[in-house]
Image (tube, grey):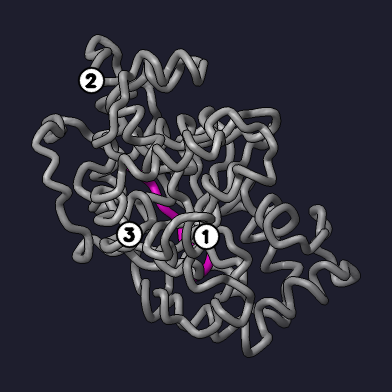
Amino acid sequence: MRHIVTILILTLGISFITACGDTSAPDVSNITVNITTQRLDKDLYALDTNNLPAELVKLKSKYPEFLDFYLDDIMGFSINGDYSDTSMGVQKGLATFLTHKDYRGVFDTVQAHYPDEKVVNEVLIKGFKYLKHYFPGYKDPHIIYLVTGLNNYGALTYGANTIGIGLDMFLGADYPFYKSVGIPEYFSRQLTKEYIPVAVMRTVYRQTNPFEVDGKPLLDMMIQSGKEMYFLTKVLPFVDAHTLLAYSPEQLAWCKENEAMVYDFFVKQELLYEKNLQKVVRYVMDGPSATGMPGESPGNIGAWTGLRIVQAYMEHHPELSLKELMEEPIDAQRFLLESKYKPK
């Protein structure tokens, strides 16, 4: 049975990732991670477009399960395993994707940024060592690098341990075609090389901990975001906090300086237990700034407040492992009370 979690995000680079200064990070030097990788992007663009039926049969042997999932579920070509000359999905959908100059331009840019996957793999292995420290049963992942024509697939999971990474969504904030396909400027921090490990670990987390909004009060959604962010701080302790949050350094500094004011805003506006999704979802989703707060605030301010609540909760529950925290059901009011959260 297929299982996919997608996250709208973009990019990485080990030389660009700086330490977060987390002296509490465990020693993972003795943990072994052996990831396997494939470059579906390169394999696709190496196909002879004059003989796609035979080429696809060969490619199917290399990606026996993932290829049809990619062609139909991700790309929407509706090929459905019919690789024949009469398949409109092959002749119109795939053939156009492989030959149109704009799509070809995206592919060429990907190759220029990522001629090989060595640097990306090194960073991911580092993160998966921490993941296996906290979750010893996690199987080493199989990574498939791909392109989707700027369709906003930064990272996705398939099956038990296959992870797809859309390299075309990690070409840098200034890549001009992001704006042309409607990606807002405030989202650009997730389009850089630094963000690839965050995108991957977020999608791994959401495979078993999907973000739920229906019927949930804002506090519940903030704690959900906070648990996710806390997870990221543990499995990616070498990544800067503002990168984990997808904030600018200035936005994170603003959050730290105004933590009490932010929480007081939610209390005074009676938003913590508000279940009207239209009123509160804007505080747990990406945006240029938080509605009703100064322009210096990040749109997803709820992730910051949620993280601070979860950190306070864990300070008062040191007996809990990361795994136990992730598995613990959220009773928002009880969680807040037991956290004894007191912003300064």
* Count of numbered marks: 3
> Which label is found at residue 287?
1
Labels 1 and 2: the sequence-earlier one: 1
Identify residue type, mark 3.
Gln
* Coordinates of residue 324 in the picture (x, y in percent): 37, 15
State the quadrant of the C terminus: top left
The residue beneath circle 3 is 251
Are there few (<14), some (14-19), or many (20+) residues within 10 Å of tag 1? some
In the rendered image, the vertical position of residue 318 relative to residue 251, given as above or below: above
Q: CA distance from mark 2 to mark 3?
A: 25 Å
In the rendered image, the vertical position of residue 60 relative to residue 201, given as above or below: below
Labels 1 and 3: the sequence-earlier one: 3
* Coordinates of residue 237 in the picture (x, y in percent): 21, 42
Element on which disc 3 rests: helix
Image: magenta residue range: 33-42
The residue sitting at 45% across, 75% down in the picture is 110
The residue sitting at 54% across, 77% down in the picture is 178
From the viewer's side, name the closer residue of 245 and 106.
245
The residue beneath circle 2 is 315
Element on which disc 1 rests: loop
Identify residue type, mark 2.
Glu
Assess whether mark 3 and mark 1 are in contact (beta carbons under 8 angstroms).
no
